[in-house]
Image (cartoon, rainbow, N blue to C red):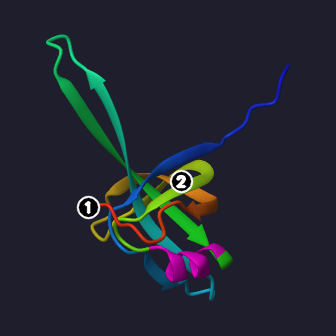
């Protein structure tokens, strides 16, 4: 039996500057969103582009790097793993979250920005 693996790679554009916080335990965390686009031709021959938004989280030194390097509109390559979690909101309603826990990222277009 082969081992399973949870790994995701995304190449896309930041929708906003990262949100940087420090937890109550003193750990720095960066939250940011990346848009990926997929283009195909529909049955009428028309070009269709679908955009997916991915929620990403980087901890510690990755949060420091994100704060320094990432800005809205730049293109990045991101590697990480998919994480599913839940929490209770202020009204006690259970909410579910899917996000990518980032292992590493690379800025692909440092100078150029893309409108998202």
In space, the residues marked 2 and 1 are separated at their CA atoms by 23 Å
Q: Residue furthest right?
A: 1
Secondary structure category for the residue under label 2: strand
User: Which residue does the image show at 22% across and 29% down from the upper left?
Assistant: 48
Answer above or below: position of 116 versus 39. Answer: below
Q: State the residue position of label 1.
A: 115
Q: Quadrant of residue 105?
A: bottom right
Q: Quadrant of the C terminus?
A: bottom left
Image location of residue 79, percent across then percent down:
62, 52
Quadrant position of residue 88: bottom left
Residue at x-position 39% and y-position 57%: 13
Magenta stretch: dominant SS?
Answer: helix
Q: Position of residue 15 (x, y in %)?
A: 32, 63
> Which of the two discs, 2 and 1, sits closer to the camera?
1
Residue at 65% across, 43% down: 7
The quarter in which the N terminus is drawn is: top right
Residue 104, magenta (yes or no)? no
Work out whether residue 106 or residue 81 is closer to the camera in this orientation and state it.
106
Provide the residue designation for mark 2.
100
């Amino acid at each position: 039996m082969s081992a399973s693996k949870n790994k995701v790679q995304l190449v896309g554009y930041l929708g906003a500057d990262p949100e940087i916080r420090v937890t109550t335990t003193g750990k720095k965390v960066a939250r940011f969103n990346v848009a990926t686009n997929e283009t195909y031709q529909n049955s009428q021959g028309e070009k269709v582009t679908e955009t997916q938004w991915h929620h990403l989280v980087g901890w510690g030194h990755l949060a420091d790097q994100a704060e320094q390097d990432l800005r809205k509109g730049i293109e990045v390559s991101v590697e990480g793993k998919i994480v599913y979690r839940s929490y209770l909101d202020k009204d006690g309603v259970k909410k579910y979250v899917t996000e990518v826990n980032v292992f590493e990222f690379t800025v692909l277009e440092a100078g150029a920005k893309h409108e998202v």
